[in-house]
Image: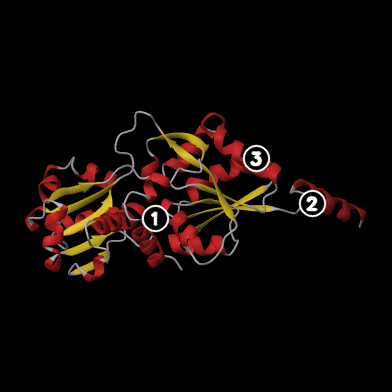
């Protein structure tokens, strides 16, 4: 009996006075739940804090947002739209932005939206798209996509199209950036919006380059933040932050594993503390604060 009691006490000490287990979570993209991408990071956080860290992936950005609102997550790797939905939502949440991946100084076209058209459509500019809207089918990526939903809606809003669903012949989602682009190339839709990385990669194929026209390219989109839960005690939170900040030196393989799960992270080199005004310029991008708020409300719970 004494041996059993001693074992229980030992386990209690090893896994923290609170019996704590931290949950590091993110969201699925296409067939990749990103569990393998974030597991090395979870192991490193566990090593540095002495606390067990489990990993979890949610099927969609919106389900991830709901999980955060339900206090299911301690450390969240979320995209820009997901964070803005949390800020705009009617439900409160108990996490705060702490860090973000730093884009290299020499980076070019890291994370942008490409609005593209099928060459056969004759759409060459945003003005053309607006003029031909009634007979144009618009294909976005997914409701939870920053580059493939939020940003194109912002630019359409700035062009006098606050509600694409009421102007274009149809608005639908291709589910992935690649599938969206391929549908435009195949003529299944005349106009599409997707992450620029997929578009630029496609231009290496001469046949694809003939089929797809670049209508508009956005400014750089800020990356999604790392969120930490307020219930994490300050000493542990500081240790977690330091783990992220030192990851490029202490465990570069873990950093590269995270980066490989997000195409927009390809031209980043380390984590950095996030500034309070990090998203300010992006929030003003549409030139219409009410337009941004309306779009976010449309997709928030």
Disc 2 target residue: 12
For the question of whether residue 197 can be seen, the reply is yes
Taking the image as shown, residue 169 lies to the left or right of residue 44, namely left
Q: Counting residues from the N terminus, which is met first, the one under dot 1 or under dot 2? A: 2
Taking the image as shown, residue 116 lies to the left or right of residue 219, namely left
Query: In this rendering, which labeled residue sits more in front, label 1 or label 3?
Result: 3
Taking the image as shown, residue 283 lies to the left or right of residue 245, namely left
Disc 1 target residue: 29
Q: Nearer the viewer, residue 166 or 1?
A: 166
Q: Counting residues from the N terminus, which is met first, the one under dot 1 or under dot 3? A: 1
**Where does residue 212 sit, x and y in percent of width and height?**
14, 50
Cα–Cα gap, marks 1 and 3: 30 Å
Question: Does dot 3 land on a helix, a strand or a loop?
Answer: helix
Q: Is residue 256 above or below residue 70?
A: above
**Where does residue 134 sit, x and y in percent of width and height?**
13, 68
Disc 3 target residue: 238
Q: Nearer the viewer, residue 235 or 260?
A: 235
Q: Counting residues from the N terminus, which is met first, the one under dot 3 or under dot 2? A: 2
């Amino acid at each position: 009996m004494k041996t059993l009691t001693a074992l229980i006490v030992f386990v209690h000490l090893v896994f923290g006075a609170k019996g704590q287990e931290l949950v590091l979570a993110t969201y699925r993209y296409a067939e990749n739940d990103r569990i393998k991408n974030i597991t090395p990071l979870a192991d490193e956080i566990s090593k540095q804090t002495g606390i067990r860290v489990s990993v979890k992936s949610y099927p969609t950005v919106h389900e991830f947002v709901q999980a955060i609102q339900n206090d299911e997550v301690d450390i969240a790797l979320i995209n820009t739209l997901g964070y803005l939905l949390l800020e705009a939502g009617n439900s409160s949440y108990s996490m705060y932005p702490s860090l973000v991946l730093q884009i290299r100084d020499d980076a070019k076209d890291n994370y942008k939206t490409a609005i593209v058209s099928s060459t056969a459509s004759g759409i060459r500019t945003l003005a053309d798209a607006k003029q031909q809207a009634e007979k144009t089918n618009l294909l976005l990526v997914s409701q939870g996509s920053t580059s493939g939903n939020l940003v194109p809606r912002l630019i359409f809003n700035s062009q006098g199209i606050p509600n694409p669903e009421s102007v274009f012949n149809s608005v639908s989602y291709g589910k992935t950036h690649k599938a969206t682009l391929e549908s435009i190339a195949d003529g299944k839709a005349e106009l599409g919006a997707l992450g620029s990385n997929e578009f630029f990669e496609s231009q290496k194929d001469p046949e694809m380059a003939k089929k797809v026209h670049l209508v508009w390219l956005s400014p750089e989109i800020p990356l999604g933040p790392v969120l930490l839960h307020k219930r994490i005690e300050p000493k542990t939170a500081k240790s977690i932050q330091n783990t992220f900040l030192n990851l490029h030196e202490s465990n570069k393989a873990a950093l590269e594993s995270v980066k490989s799960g997000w195409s927009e992270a390809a031209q980043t080199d380390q984590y950095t503390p996030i500034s309070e005004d990090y998203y300010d310029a992006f929030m003003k991008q549409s030139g219409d604060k009410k337009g941004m708020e309306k779009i976010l409300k449309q997709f928030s719970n």
